[in-house]
Amino acid sequence: MPQTVGTKEKVLFLCTGNSCRSQMAEGLLRSLDGDRFEACSAGTNPHGVHPNAVAAMREIGIDIRDQQSEHVDSYLGAGVDTVISVCDSAASNCPTFPECVRRIHWSFDDPAGATGTPEERMAVFRRVRDEIQRALKDWTAAARAA
């Protein structure tokens, strides 16, 4: 049985830099199902929230500019119910969460590594944002049905 914070399951999104994918996932889950889940994010080597991630989320009405880039170690022993890694590197370097009930891995491209014109790079952020949003909609629908 998942632990809860109040009545919410605590979900930690994990990637390497905690700058794009995990930050967008945190904002998306809070927006999609914040009444049921407490969303947070961290990285194995955090280095700040990427401005293009903020911009991509703003386009769909979600403000993540005040979210913080944190190290995964700050969540050890913090009552996390589910860890969702959103990149292969973080999945293989994730520490053990003894209290964690579930581990899920979704592999998304790193939009921070996109090349090309500013608009081409922004298109990658939008695509990855939309892929994360679809995965979260499916996951939260399945959670409600269970």
Image: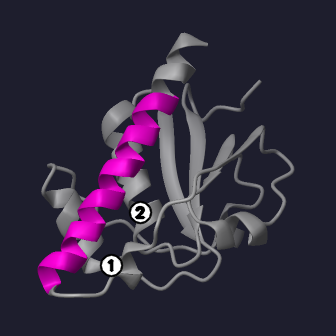
Q: Position of residue 26 (x, y in %)?
A: 43, 53
Kindly check if marks 2 and 1 are in contact, taking CB atoms under 8 A apart as contact. yes
| Segment tinted magenta in the rendering | 118-139
* Disc ID at residue 50: 1
Q: Which amino acid does label 2 sit on?
A: Gln
Q: Which of 17 and 128 is in front in this view?
A: 128
- Local secondary structure at mark 1: loop
- Local secondary structure at mark 2: helix
Q: Position of residue 94 (x, y in %)?
A: 75, 66
Q: In this view, does 136 lie to the left or right of 46?
A: left
Q: Residues within 10 Å of mark 1 (few under 14, many from 20)?
A: some
Q: In this view, does 46 lie to the left or right of 122?
A: right
Q: Residue lying furthest top in this view?
A: 145
Question: Which secondary structure is most common in the magenta stretch?
Answer: helix
- Give the Cα distance between marks 2 and 1: 9 Å
Q: Which of 108 and 11 is in front in this view?
A: 108
> What residue appears at the point 51 percent right and 54 percent down from the top-left corner?
40
Q: Quadrant of the N terminus?
A: top right
- The residue wearing badge 2 is 23
- Quadrant in the picture for residue 95: bottom right
Q: Nearer the viewer, residue 131 or 45?
A: 131
Q: Where is residue 27 in the image (x, y as percent from the top left)?
A: 35, 52
